[in-house]
């Protein structure tokens, strides 16, 4: 676990991911894609139908979040991490299809940890309960697909210095076990 904060540019480079360790504090800057439960079901169906990730998602990071409407001149009033284990049903398949990282809160399953090892991917954890503060790190937002799902739509957001910790590294180490 590093003592200093790592500044990471999105999309993430697989070689850089290999240097991260569970517990490392990081600041993310660049594009993230938000998606939650219902959106994951739709994305998995499209992946199965097409055989590849749609919407330019290969090499990207998915943030498990359901943002609130715009407020105070920002794209969202609040945006906080959703409990990641709710997306464990989809994460291994999405990692194998080319997603390089996911971001949420809480523990992940053994299957997700195994997929991180197999694919060289990572899981980032963020702090729950700080959604209004995290919204200040969002520069832009646009709906990419599934607009009818409301807060669970697929969105591309641009973050600046978004604070996270490495929850599970590409070696399968888990911050919740450290």
Image (cartoon, rainbow, N blue to C red):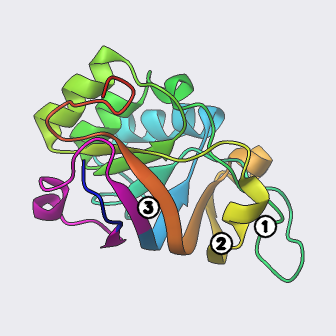
- Dot 2 or dot 1: first in sequence order is 1
Residue plotted at (66% across, 42% down): 128
Characterize the local packing of mark 3: few (<14), some (14-19) or many (20 or more) Cα atoms within 10 angstroms: few
Alpha carbon distance from label 2 to label 1: 11 Å
Residue plotted at (43% across, 68% down): 28
Residues at badges 2 and 3 in contact (C-beta under 8 Å)? no
In the image, 93 versus 120, the foreground residue is: 120
- Dot 1 or dot 3: first in sequence order is 3
- Residue 55's mark? 3
- Residue 11 falls within the magenta-colored stretch: yes
- Dot 2 or dot 3: first in sequence order is 3
Q: Secondary structure at mark 2?
A: strand
- Residue 36 falls within the magenta-colored stretch: no
Return the x and y of residue 102 as percentages of the image width and height.
41, 46
Mark 1 lies on residue: 76
Return the x and y of residue 38 as percentages of the image width and height.
64, 33
In the image, 81 versus 178, the foreground residue is: 178
Q: Which residues are magenta?
A: 6-27
Mark 2 lies on residue: 142
Residues at badges 2 and 1 in contact (C-beta under 8 Å)? no
Residue plotted at (47% across, 47% down): 103
Disc nearest the viewer among 2 and 1 = 1
Labels in figure, total: 3
């Amino acid at each position: 676990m590093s003592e200093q904060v790592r500044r990471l540019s999105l999309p993430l480079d697989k070689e850089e991911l290999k240097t991260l360790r569970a517990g490392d504090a990081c600041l993310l800057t660049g594009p993230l894609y938000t998606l939650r439960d219902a959106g994951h079901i739709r994305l998995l169906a499209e992946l199965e139908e097409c055989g590849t990730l749609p919407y330019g998602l290969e090499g990207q990071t998915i943030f498990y979040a359901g943002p609130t409407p715009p407020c105070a001149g920002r794209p969202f009033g609040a945006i906080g991490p959703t409990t990641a284990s709710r997306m464990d049903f989809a994460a291994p398949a999405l990692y194998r299809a080319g997603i390089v990282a996911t971001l949420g809160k809480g523990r992940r399953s053994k299957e997700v940890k195994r997929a991180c090892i197999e694919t060289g991917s990572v899981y980032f954890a963020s702090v729950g309960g700080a959604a209004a503060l995290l919204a200040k790190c969002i520069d832009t937002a646009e709906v990419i697909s599934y607009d009818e799902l409301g807060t669970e739509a697929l969105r591309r957001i641009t973050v600046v210095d978004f604070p996270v910790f490495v929850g599970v590294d590409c070696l399968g180490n888990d911050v919740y076990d450290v």
